[in-house]
Structures are given as structure tokens and as C-alpha cells.
Image (tube, rainbow, N blue to C red):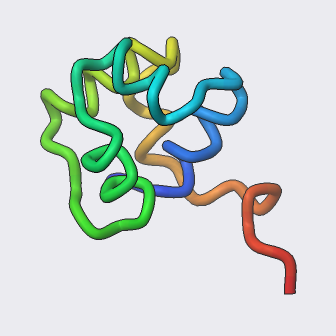
């Protein structure tokens, strides 16, 4: 199952803006924002493209949320 927090984490670890990830992956910033905010779930093909652009394995995006990217209380 796709974990939106992991997409945010991967993008931040690569120090990529939404615009940069959009250029690298071919998906609009609006779509990426929707994936990151759990409003949409990417298809496996889309997730593969995002993973390749971010240089992370697809399995990274199926792992449990990383507690370091949780919002502060």
C-alpha cells in the first residue's frame, strides 16, 4: 500500500521542489501534491516514474510512515 508520507520524505531527502520532481517525473505539481496529501493514489506505473525520478526503490513508498516526518504536536 502506498504511503504518502514516504513520497514527501523522499522528495525532501533529495532536496527537490514540487516543480523539480514534476520536471523529472513528467507529472504535474498538482498531481504530486494530491499524492503527497493522500487525495489521490498513484498507479504502479506512476509510482515507478516517481521512484525513478527520486532514485528510490518502489518498495520505499510502500513502507510504514517514517516518524521523523510526522508533524510536531
- 4 shown above or below 44: below
Residue drawn 23% across and 19% down? 26
Residue drawn 76% across and 73% down? 71
- 23 shown above or below 44: above
Residue drawn 42% across and 65% down? 37
Quarter holding the C terminus is bottom right
Q: How many numbered badges does the structure rendering display?
A: 0
Q: Residue 67 is drawn in which quadrant?
A: bottom right
| Extreme-right residue of the structure | 73
Residue drawn 31% across and 58% down? 34
Q: Which of 19 and 59 is in front in this view?
A: 19
Q: Is residue 26 left or right of residue 18?
A: left
Q: In this view, does 20 lie to the left or right of 28?
A: right
Quarter holding the N terminus is bottom left
**Residue 28 in the image: x percent, y percent?**
25, 35
**Residue 54 in the image: x percent, y percent?**
50, 19
**Residue 30 in the image: x percent, y percent?**
29, 49
Q: In this view, does 54 lie to the left or right of 50?
A: right
Q: Nearer the viewer, residue 22 or 3?
A: 22
| Extreme-bottom residue of the structure | 73
Q: In this view, does 56 lie to the left or right of 69?
A: left
Amino acid at each position: 500500500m502506498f504511503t504518502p508520507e514516504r513520497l514527501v520524505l523522499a522528495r525532501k531527502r533529495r532536496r527537490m521542489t514540487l516543480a523539480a520532481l514534476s520536471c523529472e517525473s513528467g507529472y504535474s505539481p498538482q498531481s504530486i501534491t494530491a499524492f503527497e496529501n493522500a487525495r489521490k493514489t498513484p498507479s504502479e506505473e506512476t509510482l515507478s516514474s516517481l521512484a525513478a525520478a527520486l532514485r528510490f526503490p518502489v518498495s520505499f513508498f510502500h513502507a510504514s510512515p517514517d516518524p521523523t516526518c510526522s508533524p510536531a504536536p
